[in-house]
Amino acid sequence: MTPETRPQPIRFVLNTFYSGPQAWFFLADDNGHFRDEGLDVHFTEGTSLARAVESMTTGNFDVGYGDLNELIRMQAEGGKDTPVAVMTIHNRPPYTIAVPTDGPVRTVADLAGRRLVSHPQDAALLLFPEFCRATGLDPDSVDITISEETHVELSRQMMDGKWDGIFGFVNTINSQAIEAGIEPATALRHFTWHEHVPALYGGAVLVTRPFLAAHPQAVAGLVRAINKGLKDAIADTDAAIEAVARRNPGIDRKANRERLVGTIGLEMGHPDGLRDGLGDADDARLAGIARLICETKGYPAPPPQPHEIFRREFLPPQGERARVPAR
């Protein structure tokens, strides 16, 4: 193989450990979509959707699966060497505060004075001020503890009364509640960002600016391959979970299938995606998110513009984009 035909290596940082809601990346790999585009993608497990954005400023990665809102926040704060988004995956925000259905918290206002727990740098926690701004909740009225324990353990602790609520992603909390022996459909109530702060996005494919400038064709090929992986995962969720299990044999298949199916239905279920297919971002929404973050966090600089946040020219035509089945 000559240097001209050698696959383009891509260092790709994920949001967390290998799990169900990343399955389309692994199907794109296993089904040869990356290879067909001349790409050699190497995945690294991450620690959170928000942290993945910061990880991309270290020079250790070319591509990442990170939180689009955190990217906007870092740009609004004046962060240097921030990546750019080229494909949205979550067209609705996945964030939530989960509480027991039989507990005293029945409305957002009831969160005042309660004990909540969050992982460090959880995207829901980072966007809690925006949630409070939208709902009128005083953020200082809530007692928040940071914990490194899994949502499996935190769910058990909450049901035992240690916490009144948990920050996280809807489908992550639900699936790990299942692993804890809790039935989320009956035991948990969610106060979701997609209901109260609906303009927000969630996870997106991010690319460093140096890699984008040096390898635009590779970026276009990467987006095409991920789009095909999304189609594969939506069409066959069992095969998608097997792709995850090949990389993480210890996963709970049932819980991770629930996470994947829930992610496809919720985080990818915005009407924009049903109409236009997955991957794009609306400029008006991006501008609104940037204003909201700047106003809430008190950043003095003008909000970043949509073209500084998102580059849509790498997306396949609308007719070729993955689509979530209408419900």
Image (cartoon, helix red, strand yellow):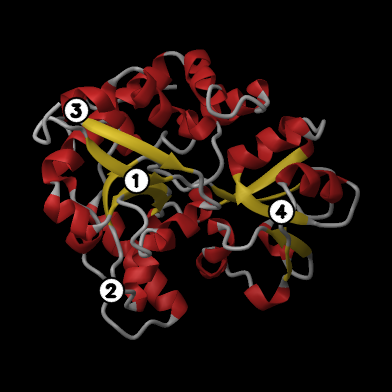
Distance from the alpha carbon under mark 4 to that under mark 1: 32 Å
Image point (38%, 20%), residue name: 30
Distance from the alpha carbon under mark 2 to that under mark 4: 30 Å
Find numbered disc 2 in the image and state the secondary structure of the residue it sits on. Answer: loop
Image coordinates for residue 213, horizontal then vertical, percent = 13, 55
Image coordinates for residue 167, horizontal then vertical, percent = 65, 55
The residue beneath circle 4 is 166
Residue 257 picture quarter: top right
Which numbered mark, 1 or 2, is in the foreground of this view?
A: 1
Please say if 60 is above or below 17. Answer: below
Q: Are marks 4 and 1 in contact (CB under 8 Å)?
A: no
The residue beneath circle 1 is 11
Pointer 3 or 4: first along the chain: 3
Image coordinates for residue 69, horizontal then vertical, percent = 40, 59
Look at the image and tell me whether residue 100 can be seen: no
Quarter of the image containing the C terminus?
A: top left
Which numbered mark, 4 or 1, is in the foreground of this view?
A: 1
Instruction: Answer few, some or many: residues within 10 Å of disc 4's Cα (few below 14, many 20 plus, some between 14 and 19).
Output: many
